[in-house]
Image (cartoon, rainbow, N blue to C red):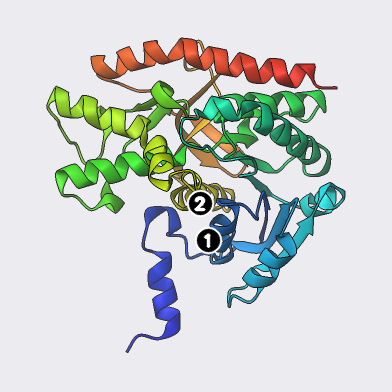
Amino acid sequence: MYSRLSLQAAALTLRRGFTSSSQSNAKVAVLGASGGIGQPLSLLLKNSPLVSHLSLYDIAHTPGVAADLSHIETRAEVKGFLGPEQLPESLKGCEVVVIPAGVPRKPGMTRDDLFNTNATIVANLATACAKHCPEAMICVIANPVNSTIPITSEVFKKHGVYNPNRIFGVTTLDIVRANTFVAQLKGLDPARVNVPVIGGHAGKTIIPLISQCTPKVEFPQDQLTALTGRIQEAGTEVVKAKAGAGSATLSMAYAGARFVFSVLDAMNGKEGVIECSFVRSEETECAYFSTPLLLGKNGIEKNLGIGKISPFEEKMVAEAISELKASIKKGEDFAKSMK
C-alpha cells in the first residue's frame, strides 16, 4: 500500500519539467490567475515544493480562486489580489512573475489578431512589474508572444530597469507538442524525447529542429513536412476542437509550469537546466529569437544558439525572419507610442 506522501512524490516526478524535489522559498505571482490558463497554472504551481508563496492577480474572481487553492495540502501560501489598485501589492517581493493574462483566440483568429487587446494588458502589467519587482524573472505567456516580449522589454527600458537575461517569452508549449507528436509517431515515451524548437511562437515562425531531437529520429520528407506543419498549427487544432470555447489552456498551463519550475531550479543553483525561450538575441538578424538557453541564478546564463541544422530547417529559419521582424517592430512601436 502506497502512502499518500509516496504517491505525491511519484506524481511530482512524472515529467522532466516537474522533477525537482528540493524545496525553496520562492514567491511567484500569476497575473491573469482567474483565466483559462491562469487557474490550472496556479494549481500546478501550488502543487510544487519550489513555491512558498503564490500571489494571484486578476481583474475578476481572484478571491475565489485563491480561497479554493488555499485548501490544498501543500505548503505554498496563496493570496488573491483583485483589480488594478491591488496589483502593486501582489508583486511585492516576487522573484518570478508569470503573465498568462489576456484574451484567448477564437476560431478563425490568428495570434496577431489578439494584438490590440493583449498589447495594452501586457504593457500595463509590465509597467507594474518594472515599478514593483524590477529584478523578478518575467515569464510572458500572453499572445502574440512575438510582440508582447518586445513590449515588455521596451517598458522595462523606459523605467531604467531592463535586464534582457530576466525577460522570457514562454514558447515551451511548442517543445511539449513537438516531443509528444514525435513520440506518437515513433512509439517512444514522450518524457524521454526532447525536440528543440526555435524562432518565434506563431505559425511559420515556430521552427522545430527534428534533426537535433534526442533520441535521434528520422522521417521521410513528406512525413517531416506534415509533422512540422502540425507542430506549427497545433494551437489552431485546439482552437477548432474547442469550437469557440477557447484555446489551448490546459496544455499551456502545463508548459508554463514546466518553464517556471526550470527557472526556479536554476535560481536554486541546479546546473544544466536548459529551456528554449523567446528572448533578446544576437543569434540572427532578429532582435528577439527563441533558442535553447542555459538558465542560471540570474536568468539566462548562456544562449546556446541554433547549432547545426538541416537544409530544411535552414530554409524555415530564412522564411521566418521577415514575419518575426514585423511582429517585433509592431510590439516596439506600440510600446514607444504609449504615454
Q: How far apart in space, not on screen, are marks 1 and 2 (Cα)?
A: 8 Å
Helix, strand or loop for disc 2: helix
In the rendered view of the protein, which quadrant contains the N terminus? bottom left
Give, as a three-letter code, the residue at label 2.
Answer: Ala
**Left or right of 109, for residue 63:** right
Asked if residue 138 is positioned above or below residue 191 in the image, the reply reads above
Is any atom of residue 52 visible in this view? yes
Residue depicted at 84% across the width and 48% down the height: 88
Give the numbered dot on residue 161: none
Crowding at mark 1 (Cα within 10 Å: few <14, some 14-19, many 20+): some
Q: Give the image quarter of residue 203.
A: top left
Give the number of marks.
Answer: 2
**Left or right of 129, for residue 268:** left
Q: Position of residue 86 (x, y in %)?
A: 84, 53
Q: Earlier in the sequence, mark 1 or mark 2?
A: 1
In the rendered view of the protein, which quadrant contains the C terminus? top right
Q: Position of residue 94 (x, y in %)?
A: 73, 51
Q: Position of residue 74 (x, y in %)?
A: 58, 74
Q: Position of residue 113 (x, y in %)?
A: 57, 26
Asked if residue 301 is positioned above or below residue 186 in the image, the reply reads above
**Residue with the mark numbered 1:** 44
**Residue with the mark numbered 2:** 253
Q: Give the image quarter of residue 148.
A: top right
Q: Are marks 1 and 2 in contact (CB under 8 Å)?
A: yes
Is any atom of residue 194 visible in this view? no
Give, as a three-letter code, the residue at label 1.
Answer: Leu
Helix, strand or loop for disc 1: helix
